[in-house]
Amino acid sequence: MRKVIALIAVLALVGVTGCAESKPDPHEQYAKQVNVVESNFANQINTLALRITPTSTKKQDNQTLEQIKLTVVQTAGKLAAIKVPQSTRFWSSSYRHTPSRLTPRSGICRQ
């Protein structure tokens, strides 16, 4: 989330300074790609979460949890595949990008 906030700040700064190039802004493209992946992820998780109810069986809940896990892994892979603009890389340098998990290098979120 901090990456997105920092990226928005950079985009606002570029807008204020009046960057008049005709080339597409790589920061804007990056933000759009990340936002699409995150939006799709949220929609999928919300849909899957609705399947776990007081009346669903343990087997059904386990299947749903496996689908949620697969969605998380696939989303991490999609985010890792998005090319970060060179001038933005310092925001992502404290994270390891792997398809199976995104964790801070500090080890705070280890499994």
Image: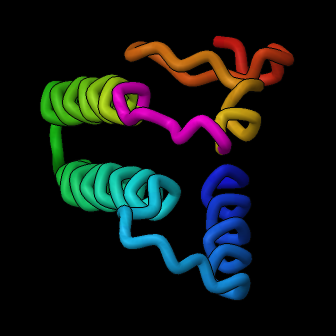
- Residue 110, how many percent across, how many down? 70, 14
Give the quadrant of residue 71: top left
Give the quadrant of residue 69: top left
- Residue 65, how many percent across, how many down? 29, 31
Tag count: 0
Residue 94 visible from this viewpoint: yes
Say how the picture is coloured. rainbow
Give the quadrant of residue 82: top left
Question: Does the magenta portion include 32?
Answer: no
Residue sitting at 35 percent across and 27 percent down?
A: 81
- Above or below, 80 against 52 in this view is above
Q: Is residue 109 left or right of residue 18?
A: right
Work out whether residue 73 or residue 5 is closer to the camera in this orientation and state it: 5
Q: Is residue 55 left or right of residue 87?
A: left
- Residue 35, how many percent across, how many down? 39, 60
Residue sitting at 64 percent across and 60 percent down?
A: 7
Range covered by the magenta-colored residues: 80-87
- Above or below, 87 against 30 in this view is above
Residue 50 visible from this viewpoint: no
Work out whether residue 59 or residue 20 is closer to the camera in this orientation and state it: 20
Work out whether residue 37 or residue 24 is closer to the camera in this orientation and state it: 24
Residue sitting at 42 percent across and 27 percent down?
A: 80
Image quadrant occupied by the C terminus:
top right
- Above or below, 78 against 36 in this view is above
